[in-house]
Image (tube, rainbow, N blue to C red):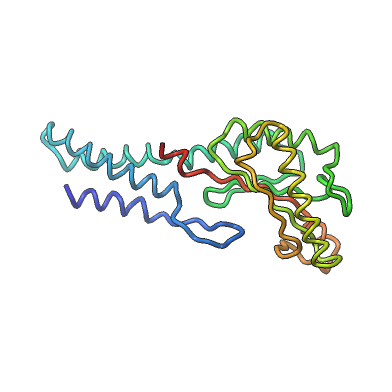
């Protein structure tokens, strides 16, 4: 039975790891980790049941499968939140993507702010209201708002502008009922381009705000 426990855990852990899109830090996927723990616990429980029925080995195999299925809470939680965000943000100009456990909302500046401005355009309030509604429904996450700028102007100006824009979005979400303790606002200036700053198209793409929604481990372990 000991061998069965080890094999069940390895089979689930082999899936991989995730990378924080901003710090570059690699970590074991929390969905994977939870699955391994569930598999191990399920295998143990299944073996006990199987032993009573006269086949401990078969019981361990079945139990490992059930345990893994019940241990992917973070992944399922984020899947559902991502689907809800895509539904509410359809045709808004905001993209909803996934990187590991993180959900990333990319908000181009042409729909969020005027040129060289940090005040949210009135037409974008409805979109942010939709984001706030989903965040309030899915409370087991932290919410990081990242501001970015193109390379036009000085480094110091772009840094300050990106910080003000991130703070504007963060403050607005808080005003709509998202708990301030879940929110952080960070400005990256021109240091994280996603396109070529030598073209107008590239500069427009680089002027953006991103929201990264990350599960809080402790909320799933209690």
Estimate the x, y position of residue 40 in percent, counting from the top left.
28, 45
Residue name at image x 77 percent, y 55 percent: 162
Residue name at image x 15 percent, y 40 percent: 56
Residue name at image x 33 percent, y 45 percent: 37
Estimate the x, y position of residue 59 in percent, counting from the top left.
20, 38
Estimate the x, y position of residue 123 in percent, counting from the top left.
84, 37
Residue sitting farthest toward the left: 54
Choose between 6 and 116: the one closer to the eye.
116
Choose between 183 and 132: the one closer to the eye.
183
Q: Is residue 90 left or right of residue 97?
A: right
Choose between 209 and 1: the one closer to the eye.
209
Residue name at image x 68 percent, y 34 percent: 132
Query: Which quadrant would the C terminus be assigned to in this image?
Result: top left
Choose between 85 and 148: the one closer to the eye.
148
Estimate the x, y position of residue 21 in percent, counting from the top left.
60, 57
Residue 44 occupies which quadrant of the picture? top left
Number of marks in the image? Answer: 0
Residue sitting farthest toward the right: 115
Q: Is residue 43 left or right of residue 52?
A: right
């Amino acid at each position: 039975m000991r061998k069965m426990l080890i094999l069940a855990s390895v089979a689930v852990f082999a899936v991989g790891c995730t990378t924080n899109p901003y710090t570059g830090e690699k970590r074991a996927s929390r969905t994977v980790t939870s699955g391994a723990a569930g598999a191990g616990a399920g295998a143990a429980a299944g073996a006990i049941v199987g032993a009573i029925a006269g086949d401990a080995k078969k019981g361990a195999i079945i139990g490992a499968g059930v345990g893994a299925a019940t241990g992917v809470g973070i992944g399922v939680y984020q899947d559902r939140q991502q689907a809800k965000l895509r539904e509410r943000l359809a045709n808004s100009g905001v993209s909803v993507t996934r990187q590991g456990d993180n959900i990333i909302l990319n908000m181009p500046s042409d729909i969020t702010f005027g040129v060289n401005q940090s005040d949210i355009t009135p037409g974008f309030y409805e979109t942010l209201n939709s984001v706030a509604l989903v965040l309030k429904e899915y409370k087991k996450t932290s919410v990081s708002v990242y501001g970015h700028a193109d390379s036009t102007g000085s480094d110091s100006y772009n840094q300050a502008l990106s910080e003000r824009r991130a703070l504007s979005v963060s403050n607005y979400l808080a005003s709509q009922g998202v708990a301030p303790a879940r929110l952080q606002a960070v400005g990256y200036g021109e240091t994280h381009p996603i396109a070529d700053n030598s073209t107008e198209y590239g500069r427009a793409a680089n002027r953006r705000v991103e929201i990264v929604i990350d599960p809080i481990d402790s909320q799933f372990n209690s």
